[in-house]
């Protein structure tokens, strides 16, 4: 992608402390048993995992989003559905390692009750502390310091019993996080070794319902080459890509189409034959027409030239700019129309 810069925020979303009462846990266990009449996320997940059939009338895709307050608050999920006029099939949130937080059973229960699949970005850092956190250097993870914590997550997600997409240590290819290559002495080989170690622990503990999403930022000058940090097809279930159109408001390369942001990286990775997702995306309103940007991306560019993208997760937050779907009435209408053709 040349010198295009499509990075974004360093700050992170609210801290999870999680936990649930015994009654909530019992309700969760009941909710997680798919029935033949309402198979829920399991059937969706299986369909998305499968290669597209040449005979299919059209590719099956799903959409979802990260939204502040979701999924900790069930009413936020309901309001999102009302706002968009459609129910997202994927619900995304972030959880860091800094206090060895357990999986939020409350979040899992809310997403299960909502009928969606959880997408958890699992970040080995203290989200409040920035990049220089040597206690989270890859060497410490590789040494076994976090093994008990990793095992606890594997067991908790196995007990959940429904599909989960786990986006471990994302955007490792640019120097923004304690796990990034080139930060705190981390090498590409260290990253691959840690990824394989974590996935091996999950498999050893029977968490076969967890799909590991390897998710770099889209490439630009100075990022680590994808080939150096790809853990291998045997260790990756999905490939994600993150990218943003900062428009004229941010110094991220100007107004860029979806294809200008994603296509070069997509073409480097699609040959692995894995289902792919746009794991984070957003657009500014400044410098172009956001409504047309959304329509073009979801109705044309993805299905016509990047069909391996089986899912899109919108970053629905006002941060460096207003990334939200509802940043304008026109953008909201464009998104509403686009997702009617998905799923």
Image: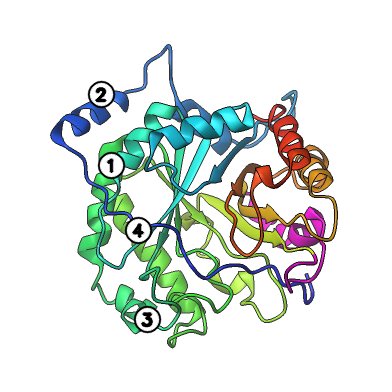
Residue extending furthest toward the left: 22
Q: Which mark is residue 15?
A: 4
Would you say residue 254 sits in the magenta stretch? yes
Residue 54: percent from the left, percent from the top?
74, 30
Q: Return the mark for residue 105.
A: 1
Q: Nearer the viewer, mark 4 or mark 2?
A: 4
Name the residue carrying label 2. 30
- Quarter placement of the N terminus: bottom right
In this rendering, the label closer to the viewer, 4 or 1: 4
Q: State which tag comes first along the sequence, 4 or 2.
A: 4
The residue beneath circle 3 is 133
Residue 46 visible in the current orientation: no
Q: How many numbered discs, if any?
A: 4
Instruction: Look at 45% across and 27% down and name the residue there.
Output: 115
| Residue drawn at point x = 43 percent, y = 16 percent | 38
How far is the residue under mark 4 from the one under mark 2?
27 Å
Q: Position of residue 79 (x, y in %)?
A: 51, 32
Magenta-tinted stretch: 248-275
Residue 111's place in the image compared with 139, above or below, is above
Is label 4 in a helix, a strand or a loop?
loop
Q: Position of residue 70 (x, y in %)?
A: 44, 43
């Amino acid at each position: 992608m040349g010198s295009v810069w499509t990075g974004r925020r360093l700050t992170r979303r609210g801290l999870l402390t999680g936990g649930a009462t015994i009654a909530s846990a019992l309700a969760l266990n009941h909710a997680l048993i798919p029935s033949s009449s309402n198979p829920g996320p399991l059937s969706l997940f299986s369909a998305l995992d499968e290669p597209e059939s040449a005979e299919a009338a059209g590719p099956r895709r799903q959409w979802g989003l990260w939204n502040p307050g979701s999924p900790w608050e069930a009413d936020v999920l309901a309001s999102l559905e009302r706002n968009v006029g459609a129910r997202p099939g994927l619900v995304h949130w972030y959880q860091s390692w800094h206090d060895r937080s357990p999986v939020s059973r409350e979040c899992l229960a809310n997403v299960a009750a909502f009928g969606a699949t959880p997408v958890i970005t699992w970040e080995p850092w203290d989200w409040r502390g920035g990049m220089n956190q040597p206690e989270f250097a890859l060497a410490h993870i590789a040494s076994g310091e976090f093994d008990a914590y990793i095992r606890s997550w594997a067991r908790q997600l196995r007990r959940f019993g429904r599909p989960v997409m786990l986006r471990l240590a994302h955007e490792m290819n640019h120097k923004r996080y304690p796990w990034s290559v080139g930060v705190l002495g981390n090498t590409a080989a260290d990253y691959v070794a840690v990824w394989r170690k974590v996935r091996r622990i999950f498999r050893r503990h029977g968490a076969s319902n967890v799909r590991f999403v390897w998710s770099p930022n889209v490439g630009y000058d100075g990022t680590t080459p994808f080939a150096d940090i790809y853990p291998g097809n045997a260790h990756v279930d999905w490939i994600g890509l993150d990218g943003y159109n900062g428009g004229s408001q941010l110094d991220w390369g100007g107004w860029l189409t979806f294809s200008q942001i994603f296509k070069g990286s997509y073409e480097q990775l699609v040959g692995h034959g894995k289902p792919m997702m746009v794991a984070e995306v957003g657009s500014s309103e400044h410098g172009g027409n956001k409504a047309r940007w959304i329509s073009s991306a979801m109705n044309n560019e993805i299905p016509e030239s990047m069909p391996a993208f089986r899912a899109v997760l919108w970053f629905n937050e006002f941060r460096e700019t207003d990334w939200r779907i509802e940043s304008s009435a026109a953008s909201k209408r464009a998104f509403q129309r686009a997702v009617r053709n998905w799923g």
